Amino acid sequence: MRIALTTGSDPMRRLILFRHAKSDWPEGIADQERPLAARGRQAAPRMGRYLADEGLRPDKVLVSPARRTRETWDLVGAEFPAPPDSVSEPRIYEAPAARLLAVVREQAPEIQTLMLVGHNPGLEELADLLVQHGSTTARGAMDEKFPTGAVAVIDLPIDAWSAVAPESGRLDRFVTPRILLGDS
């Protein structure tokens, strides 16, 4: 069953920003080839179960080509009964907020829920750029730190991704692996 995102009669899109899980940086390994750390391999499925249990299933997932983001998505996506479609998007790697926003604006209007699996500082900057309203508790947590494995869910009152504008979003929730463990 598909749930339409609406606020009354207003159209709505949902953007899920997912920072890759905790990674290692072994000596001699290029940044793009950094694997997940043991902690990241434990946290990613937990975050995936949370997303699946909460009905936060994206229609499309754009994943940075870095190894740590691919590994994160593989573990997260496996927690959905039917893994959402994912696409490697090179422009997400090391992207500032402006480039991420351009990628979001290019998405097809029939996509209701879009997820980006990427990196900081770009994801945090994009969340800050888009969010004007929403949960003050979630905003406080996000402003404090956007750690590895964190997810920001932003609702946007638009009928097409091309209409995404700064300060147009409402932060629905901000969740981290530590919050799910009750260790916030």
Image (cartoon, rainbow, N blue to C red):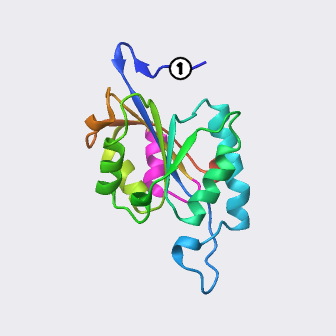
Residue extending furthest top? 9
Confirm whether the magenta stretch covers residue 140. Answer: yes
* Horizontal and vertical percent position of residue 72: 62, 56
Name the residue that disc number 1 marks. 3
Q: Is 73 positioned to the left or the right of 93 in the image? A: right
Q: Which residues are magenta?
A: 136-149
Q: Is 109 positioned to the left or the right of 31 in the image? A: left
**Residue 96 sits in which quadrant?**
bottom left
| Total marks in image | 1
Q: Residues within 10 Å of mark 1 (few under 14, many from 20)?
A: few
* Horizontal and vertical percent position of residue 4: 48, 19
* Horizontal and vertical percent position of residue 130: 33, 44
Q: Which secondary structure class fits the magenta region best?
A: helix
Q: Is 45 positioned to the left or the right of 18 in the image? A: right
3 versus 125 height, above or below: above
Q: Residue 182: tell me if it is visible.
A: no
Confirm whether the magenta stretch covers residue 94. Answer: no
| Mark 1 secondary-structure assignment | loop
Residue lying at 46% horizontally and 56% vertically, measured from the top left: 144
Residue extending furthest bottom? 28
Q: Amino acid at mark 1?
A: Ile
Of residues 125 and 132, the one drawn nearer to the viewer in this rendering:
125
Quadrant of the frame with the N terminus:
top right
Residue lying at 65% horizontally and 47% vertically, measured from the top left: 76
